[in-house]
Image: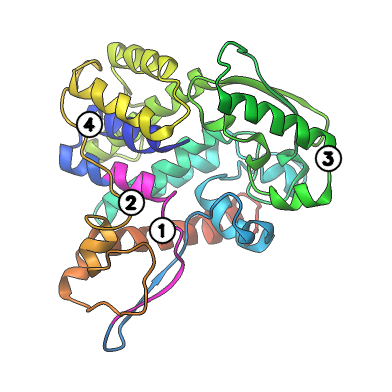
Amino acid sequence: MNIDFHYGVVYIAARLGGLSAQDAQTVAHACQYIDDATTPGLLKFDGGAQFERFASAHKLFDYENVQDDLNRLVWTPFHFLPAGIGETLEQRAICRPDSEVARNLVRHALARRDADNALHRLGVTLHTYVDTWAHQGFSGIESDYNKVSYLEADDCTREDWLERLERFTAHLLDRLQSDVVARALPLGHGAALTYPDLPWAKWHYVNGKGEPVHRDNLPQFTEAADMACRVVQAWVAKTDDFVDQPGLPAAAKTALQQLLANNINMDELKRLDVIRDAVAAGSIPGIKERIPDYIAKGVGSWKHLATGIKVADDGDDFPQWTPGFETSDYRKFHDAVKEHRFVVVQEILPASGLRLA
């Protein structure tokens, strides 16, 4: 999923689930920031103080994507949560929608609602949870299930230049079938290009096991939004039982599905603009307001507000540590990332028979 869902739709689900506008923004921002937090390592302050950060994403063609050990610590816990179903490790590592493993992860986050970074942890968890619908059938380890051939969209009417490029690339991958390509795109759905993340897409492919796979994203994305709303409703109700919450109101669910079906620009930022305009106009029953801007990096970003750093990388100058850093969204988010990864890799997956790191 892209920013239109992780930020825009999650904001809608959070508001309709009962969160205040400020809390909904925090949750939605944390949910999207998982895709933008690509800087690992220590943040060093002037005077010697340090703060540890984990990257929760890599760029698609980052060299680190060819290192399976790193994939297991980034893509597996945050983007391709294993369902733990099957006989072999390869099968059990496959991501499946709304798996019991995913539900256990959600319950763990709900149980931590009293932590000072609980909203950030909720946003991080929702990112992983809704991605189980978009990323189903793929995994965060090197696997034949991630290999894609005969990739095509079922709806051939949308013939913009980018789609034609994707079709050409997909057929080129079919023909090459080389070790170079396999190592360049070993993670998750890299070989499936953007299809898993497009809310309206109907598409099909053959995986590396020779199995035909048919996908219709729209009902899956709508279900993901509904379940995200249930999670928030459970949060507000102070219960861990989110599955039995009512979810999106019927009228809002119908309107949201129609919005996702018709919002077919290939630019995810433009899709987010459409969602923001729709919410501001009251097109989704139950919410009529301005969705706040999302700033990933630079001036106004969580990092800048916490440290004063204005550029994408840290540069040569060490920021000054202040007590405000400890209460900042940036600190709370990165601690939530560390907590999330530990719980997934060291507790939830081993309890499901998976030791991946």
The answer to which of marks 4 and 2 sits earlier in the sequence is: 4
- Per the rendering, the mark at residue 337 is 1
As shown in the figure, which amino acid type bears the numbered disc 1? Val
Q: Secondary structure at mark 1?
A: helix
- Please tell me which residue is depicted at 60% across the width and 12% down the height of the picture: 155
Q: The C terminus lies in which quarter of the figure?
A: bottom right
Q: Nearer the viewer, mark 3 or mark 1?
A: 3
Q: Earlier in the sequence, mark 3 or mark 1?
A: 3
Foreground residue among 190 and 31 = 190
Closer to the N terminus: mark 2 or mark 3? 3
Q: Residue at label 2? A: 296
Q: Quadrant of residue 158?
A: top right
Q: Residue at x 33, y 49 (%)?
A: 30
Q: Which residue is mark 3?
A: 176
Badge number at residue 155: none
**Callout 3, which amino acid?**
Leu
For mark 4, what is the residue? Answer: 15
C-alpha gap between disc 1 and disc 4: 23 Å
Residue density around tag 1, few if under 14, some if 14–19, many if 20 or more, within 10 Å: many
**Left or right relative to 194: residue 8:** left
Q: Nearer the viewer, residue 128 or 355?
A: 128
Alpha carbons under labels 4 and 2: distance apart: 21 Å
Classify 10 Å Cα crowding around label 2: few (below 14), some (14-19), many (20 and above): some
User: Which segment did they paint magenta?
Assistant: 27-45
